[in-house]
Amino acid sequence: MGYLRSEIQSHPLAKVARALDEVCAGAEQAEADARELLIAVVDLLAEGVDVPFFQRLRDEVASSSLLSLGRLLRRPITTSMRPPAPPGSDNSRVPDYGTGRTLTLGERKALARRPTRKAMEKLFADPHPVVIRTLLANPKVVEDDVIRLAARRPNQPEVLAEIARSPRWSHRVRVRMAVVLNPVSPPELAVPLLALLVRPELKLVADAAYLAPVLRVAARDLLARRPPVRTATAKVRLQ
């Protein structure tokens, strides 16, 4: 991802947009190299460090009709990315850690670095994204823990965003699907993740009536562009 960022910064926007469009088009056709490179692109989008750059990229996509890249960068028409609530602004949701008082953010972060299994259950319910980010990096956390966190309803967009931005977890198929299928996942994070899904996963998203329309439409578009599944009979005939 660091290499991709440096390449993007050292080339004109129009050239970057065309190159990314080629990668997206190849990934839509299930080309292995393109799909592998697309992982870094999606990670960079999830990181969202340079939001103005991605807006300029969207403008270039629109002016140059780069359809494949446009599908990756698709956002809801009627809504924009809402500003996150100030971290820790709702202390009423901080779990009771059994100390007789509300732990400070620093104390909760320290606990997330070396939690017991009992404390981990409380930490996963913590509303602060920094606590969740610290916990996701802990080697004691296992995939099933993260899947339960990603699938939780109700949930918070900021928590799901932390999972989507964690390379350790967002590259795992079950975790990725749990994030995408959660109705409060921010579309600007969930839509790019669709590009990494295979046909059965895309169909599951497209048929999920409770998900945002932009997500279902994007899944249907990608599903229509995936190459058809070759059956054993078809392989024999081609031979």
Image (tube, helix red, strand yellow):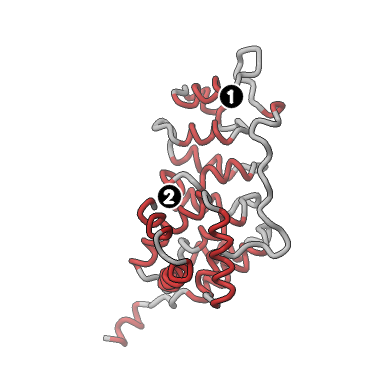
x, y percent for residue 101:
66, 14
Work out how far the residue at label 1 is from the one at label 2, CA to CA, in angstroms.
29 Å
For residue 28, say whether it is visible. no
Q: Nearer the viewer, residue 95 or 91?
A: 91
Quarter of the image that includes the C terminus? bottom left
Q: Nearer the viewer, residue 89 or 199?
A: 89
Residue at x 62% of width, y 65% of height: 216
From the viewer's perspective, is residue 18 above or below residue 145?
below
Image-based side of 172 in relation to 185, left or right = left
- For mark 1, give the secondary structure: helix
Residue at x 55% of width, y 40% of height: 149
From the viewer's perspective, is residue 223 above or below residue 191?
below
Image-based side of 208 in relation to 17, left or right = right
The residue wearing badge 1 is: 105
Q: Nearer the viewer, mark 1 or mark 2?
A: 1
The residue wearing badge 2 is: 172
Residue flagged by tag 1: what amino acid is it? Leu
Circle 1 packing at 10 Å, graded few (<14), some (14-19), many (20+), is some
Of pointers 1 and 2, the one earlier in the residue sequence: 1
Residue flagged by tag 2: what amino acid is it? Arg
Residue at x 40% of width, y 72% of height: 26
x, y percent for residue 169:
44, 45
List the single residue furthest toward the top. 100
For residue 96, say whether it is visible. yes
Which disc is residue 114 wearing?
Answer: none
Residue at x 49% of width, y 52% of height: 176
